């Protein structure tokens, strides 16, 4: 059975990916930034099919060299590690460069020291697809690119969009110029909801996308409901997309993973429908007008890996896990 390397193994998406890989019989080696996090994940997985290595800094040029030299059984690499941080002083140094250099370093190491690796999967983002110039008449598909400039990261969300756009472009450019042994596919998720892979990961503040639901649960009855909206996909479907990207004979795919639109109000309405919680009501029924947003058409992706978990089920599973672990 194939041994798969997963970078950033303790991430929200990566943990679900690893759970599904192990369930299908794969051996998995994951990179973690510290022994403490590695031991926690190993305990949660409770499987002899998972081991980890410590790579504290993925932007070092030789960060992945030794692990690839030492493990010639690795034949596939899933690169999920990338910073999703917004509370930083230097967006270039703390967000953009780590995403870009980390990705290039991985591919260089594979080409130099692991020619037996034939499959590479990169976790990109809808941020590499959507752009501020897109209007309600724009049809966004798997072929759409964010046209943001390299120096466009002047505030947190823009910096993230720059990081994901140019890191993904580096994958396409590397493959075109360097002609490595591996073929590749890219997974582009929108906002990701759904339960954590393990209850022990439910804490005061979750990762950026899952925290959207968690923030709603922290509202007081008299609070205003903040305006926020976007596209949604469940984390379990993102993991499914990674396994498809790994196993399919198709190559050079972009898998645009979105099931439907959401807003804070539409999520709040679903929470009130399914739970008896002391939360604000907002303006029920008004959160589902997305007519001013670009049109999303990921029919190619859905034909390959759909159907996806719907927003209501994802919200129910997310909220239930949070509530169960507050007891």
Image (cartoon, rainbow, N blue to C red):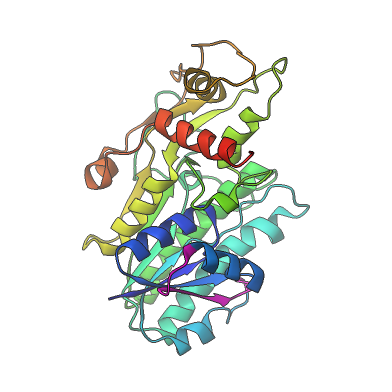
Percent from the top left, x then y, of residue 234? 42, 41
* Residue 281 lies in the magenta stretch: no
Q: Which residues are magenta?
A: 45-59
Q: Which residue appears at 57% of the width and 33% of the height?
A: 213
Is 181 in front, or is 317?
Answer: 317
Task: Left or right? Give the position of 182 relative to 210.
Answer: left
Percent from the top left, x then y, of residue 291? 43, 18
Task: Name, please, the residue furthest toward the bottom.
Answer: 70
Percent from the top left, x then y, of residue 71? 43, 85
**Quadrant, the N terminus:** bottom left
Task: Left or right? Give the position of 232 relative to 185.
Answer: right
Q: Which residue appears at 34% of the width and 49% of the height?
A: 255
Q: Which residue appears at 61% of the width and 35% of the height?
A: 214
Is 277 in front, or is 4?
Answer: 277
Which picture quadrant has residue 324? top right
Task: Left or right? Give the position of 72 relative to 275.
Answer: left
């Amino acid at each position: 059975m194939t041994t798969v390397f997963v970078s950033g193994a303790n991430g929200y998406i990566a943990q679900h990916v690893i759970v599904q890989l192990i369930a299908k019989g794969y051996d998995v080696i994951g990179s973690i930034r510290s022994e403490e996090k590695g031991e926690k994940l190993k305990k949660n997985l409770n499987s002899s099919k998972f081991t980890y290595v410590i790579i504290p800094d993925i932007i070092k040029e030789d960060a992945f060299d030794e692990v690839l030299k030492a493990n010639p059984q690795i034949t596939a690499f899933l690169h999920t590690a990338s910073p999703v941080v917004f509370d930083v002083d230097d967006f270039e140094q703390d967000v953009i460069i780590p995403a870009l250099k980390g990705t290039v370093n991985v591919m260089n190491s594979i080409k130099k020291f692991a020619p037996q690796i034939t499959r590479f999967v990169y976790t990109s983002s809808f941020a590499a697809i959507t752009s501020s110039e897109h209007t309600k008449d724009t049809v966004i598909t798997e072929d759409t690119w964010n046209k943001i400039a390299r120096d466009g990261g002047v505030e947190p969300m823009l910096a993230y969009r720059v990081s994901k756009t140019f890191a993904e472009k580096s994958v396409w450019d590397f493959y075109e110029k360097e002609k490595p042994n591996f073929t590749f596919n890219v997974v582009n998720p929108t906002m990701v909801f759904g339960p954590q892979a393990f209850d022990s990961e439910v804490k005061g503040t979750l990762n950026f996308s899952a925290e959207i639901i968690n923030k709603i649960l922290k509202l007081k009855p008299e609070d205003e409901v903040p305006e926020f909206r976007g596209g949604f996909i469940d984390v379990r479907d993102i993991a499914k997309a990674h396994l498809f990207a790994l196993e399919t004979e198709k190559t050079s795919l972009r898998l645009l993973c979105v099931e439907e639109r959401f807003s804070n109000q539409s999520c709040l309405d679903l929470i009130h429908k399914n739970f008896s919680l002391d939360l604000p009501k907002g303006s029920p029924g008004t959160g589902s007008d997305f007519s001013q947003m670009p049109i999303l058409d990921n029919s190619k992706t859905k034909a390959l890996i759909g159907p996806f978990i719907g927003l209501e089920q994802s919200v129910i599973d997310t909220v239930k896990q949070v509530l169960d672990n507050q007891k």
